[in-house]
Amino acid sequence: MDKPFDWTQKRPDFDTMTYEETIRFCIALEQAAAAFYEELVQGTDDPVAKALFGELALMERGHEQRLEQLDEEAFFETVPTTIIDLKTTDYLEVAEPGQELTTQGILILAAQREKATRDLYAELALRYAAEPFLHEFFKMMAEEEAKHKYILEEEYERMMGGEM
């Protein structure tokens, strides 16, 4: 999959994809996420937003590397965590296509993208339930995406002055 992931497209049918196709899809997904945050870094003058988006871009590049290497030994050295889902942005609407987004709108969009990616990795964990390493790997990737959503929602709440 050479082109970046198109967030408007339907998810592929993972039941018809090989393991290698699934991993290539996930790598493209992470590349698109990193490019999204890198573009946001370039498009903002807000130093807090610039640092936040830069940090998220680095995390997404790290996910890309994990997927490319799929090092089982290194994977099991990580400590799993469970992230609380604040759900702050789950039901908020983003501006219409073509409209310029505010920083709050960007945070909503980014958090919703992280939720979609988390859900996708959770689906893949179920798909590979019979293969312990892949099952645990995709569960861990889902938690990583949940962490990104949490970071974005915390920032959104901070910007909104705790009005949520």
Image (spheres, grey):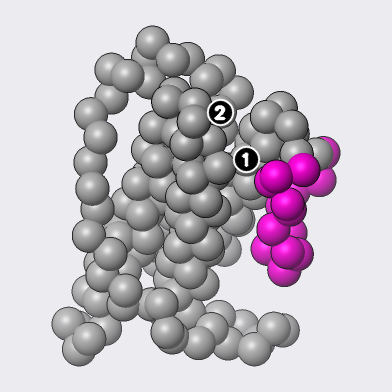
Instruction: Tell me the magenta residue range.
Output: 2-16
- Residue 18 is situated, as x and y percent measured from the top left of the image, at 74, 32
Q: In the image as oriented, which residue stretches furthest toward the right?
A: 2
Identify the secondary structure beneath mark 2: helix
Marking on residue 120: none
Q: Nearer the viewer, residue 60 or 139?
A: 139
Which amino acid type is shown beneath numbered disc 1? Cys
Residue that label 2 marks: 67
The answer to whether the residue labelled 2 contacts the one labelled 1, judged by CB atoms less than 8 Å apart, is yes
Q: Residue at horizontal 30%, vertical 60%?
A: 150
Which amino acid type is shown beneath numbered disc 2? Leu
Please identify the quadrant where the N terminus is shown: top right
- Residue 131 is situated, as x and y percent measured from the top left of the image, at 49, 26
Q: In the image as oriented, which residue stretches furthest toward the front?
A: 130
Identify the secondary structure beneath mark 1: helix
Residue 79, above or below 90: above
- Residue 120 is situated, as x and y percent measured from the top left of the image, at 54, 53
Residue that label 1 marks: 26
Q: Nearer the viewer, residue 101 or 17?
A: 17
Answer with left or right where residue 156 lies relative to residue 131.
left
